Amino acid sequence: MNKHEAINYLELPAKDISATKAFFTTVFKWTFVDYGPDYSAFSDSGVEGGFYQSDLMSTTLKGAALIVFYSDKLEQTQAKVEQAGGAIIKPIFTFPGGRRFHFIEPSGNEFAVWSDKE
């Protein structure tokens, strides 16, 4: 059900849609539906969205919003990110309320994962 005036869908750039799809399928178990060669919609992520073909990247250094995942097992999730080809750009650190790390996926977009578990 769509909620009035709530975030409903995210669209993100991807230099390599195939590699990005493989990464998110492996690490986070997302599913994808392709709409031509330049767009792939994702689901099973908490919010639906899609990746569009682009040479641009979404990073906080460029002023982009940061999409943050939650994990009950932060170290395990970081290991999965690394094994699937993600690059850790900020190793696990503490902040008020928990711990998190930042990573870059194969198309160059930055994401973070946080946990309130030790």
Image (cartoon, rainbow, N blue to C red):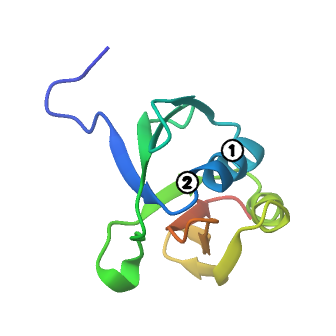
Q: Secondary structure at mark 1?
A: helix
Residue at 71% x, 68% y is 86
* Residues at marks 1 and 2 touching, judged by CB atoms closer than 8 Å: yes
x, y percentage for residue 66? 40, 66
* Sequence order check, earlier mark of 1 and 2: 1
**Callout 2: few (<14), some (14-19), or many (20+) C-alpha neighbours within 10 Å?**
some
**Quadrant occupied by the N terminus:** top left
Up/down of 80 relative to 62, above or below: above
x, y percentage for residue 94? 60, 80
**Quadrant occupied by the C terminus:** bottom right
Report the number of discs. Answer: 2
Left or right for 5, reference 28:
left
Residue designated by label 2: 69
Left or right for 81, reference 100:
right
Q: Quadrant of residue 105?
A: bottom right
Q: What amino acid is found at the position of numbered circle 1 in the picture? A: Phe
Q: Quadrant of residue 107?
A: bottom right
Residue designated by label 1: 28
Residue at 71% x, 37% y is 29
Q: What amino acid is found at the position of numbered circle 2 in the picture? A: Phe
Q: Quadrant of residue 30?
A: top right
